[in-house]
Amino acid sequence: MRRYGKNPDEDDIRVRPNRKGNRPRTNIRPKHEDAADGMVLTVDRGRLTVLIDDIPVTAMKARELGRKAAVVGDQVSVVGDLSGKKDTLARIVRIGERTSVLRRTADDDDPYERVVVANADQLAIVTALADPEPRPRMIDRCLVAAYDSGLDPLLVLTKSDLDPPDKLLEMYGALGVPYVVTSRDELESGAAVSRVREQLDGKITVFVGHSGVGKTTLVNALVPKGSRRTTGHVNAVTGRGRHTTTSALALPLPDDNGWVIDTPGVRSFGLHYVDPSRVIHAFPDLEPGTENCPRACSHDEPDCALDEWVAQGHADPARLYSLRRLLATRERREGD
């Protein structure tokens, strides 16, 4: 049935009033050309602290970003109140392209990836030589995560006054991973700080390790006093540390010569997302030997061409052993 006549005019058209009084929806989004650029320092329950022109600004993610989340280390564009004063809130309207992403899963069967930090250059794997005892499987997993993410690994061994580092260093010697050994006395006196700083200058370094290994104590020794975090202790019964860091936090090194990102202590480092074929890129002396490997070779099977490549003297057998040990970390539990 025709609602209007053959020649309706404007008076014949009924327009329903907009009861909410809001503007009609549009697909045109503002360009935010006046947005200020900054770096995400920390994330806490939907509120992000962004450093803009040396001023920490509290911000939240704009709705237009959808499910895309900003993490510590992200370069973002922010609009709104940028004064940094108490009870003010700005909006993050853009997240810059990431140069690197460090991820982990709760375990190897968990498909949900958790982004730890973005845009880091280096992964410092902090391990105590005693109290708590070192866990090589955890170190292996962090190394795989670093190689997969394109980060340079750094091994930081603490509490050398309780146990010598020789055995652990021998295990990772073939990988050629740089390392720093510290003791508790050296950290208290500041003697170890300069050695660690040499490895951090000019880089964004994320610190990862179990609770109680001295990770936050080391970070506190590296950064100005005003930025220091609470430290904990190791439980005498369980041999495990107590979580004192609850969220990742980026802190500037003195003279603005780099950043350190302190992360909460982890009990596991799942590698569900890792593509084993990317790990071989961290072994440039072995990678050419994979050209004759069978399709989809795991590099740990009878027909792998790497065995012949090493037998011909192109690479050290210890390097092949280390590669296969790292690739096998997904099949082994950390406590095995």
Image (cartoon, rainbow, N blue to C red):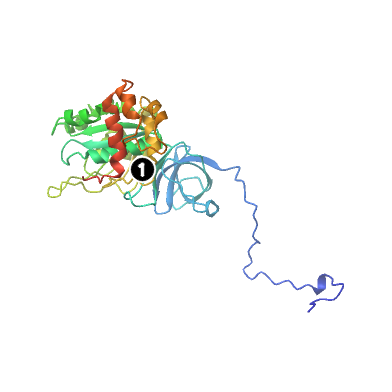
318 or 206, nearer to the observer: 318
Camera-nearest residue between 24 and 321: 321
- The percent position of residue 11, horizontal first and vertical second, equals 82, 73
Q: Quadrant of the C terminus?
A: top left
Furthest residue to the bottom? 1
- Evaluate whether residue 6 shows in this view: yes
Amino acid identity at mark 1: Leu
Say above or below: 238 vs 200. below
Mark 1: which secondary structure? strand
Q: Residue furthest right?
A: 7
Q: Quadrant of the N terminus?
A: bottom right
Viewed as shown, does residue 257 lie left or right of 94?
A: left
Q: Which residue is mark 1?
A: 249
Name the image quarter holding residue 302. Answer: top left
Q: Residues within 10 Å of mark 1 (few under 14, many from 20)?
A: many
Q: Residue furthest top?
A: 313
Percent position (x, y) of residue 209? 27, 41
- The residue shown at (78%, 72%) is 13
332 on left or right of 239? right
- Residue 260 can be seen in this image: no
Quarter holding residue 121: top left
Q: Position of residue 135 (x, y in %)?
A: 21, 40
Residue 189 falls in image quadrant: top left
How many numbered markers are drawn? 1
Q: Is residue 32 above or below residue 7?
A: above
Q: Residue 292, position in %: x, y?
A: 41, 29
**Residue found at x 50% / y 49%:** 90
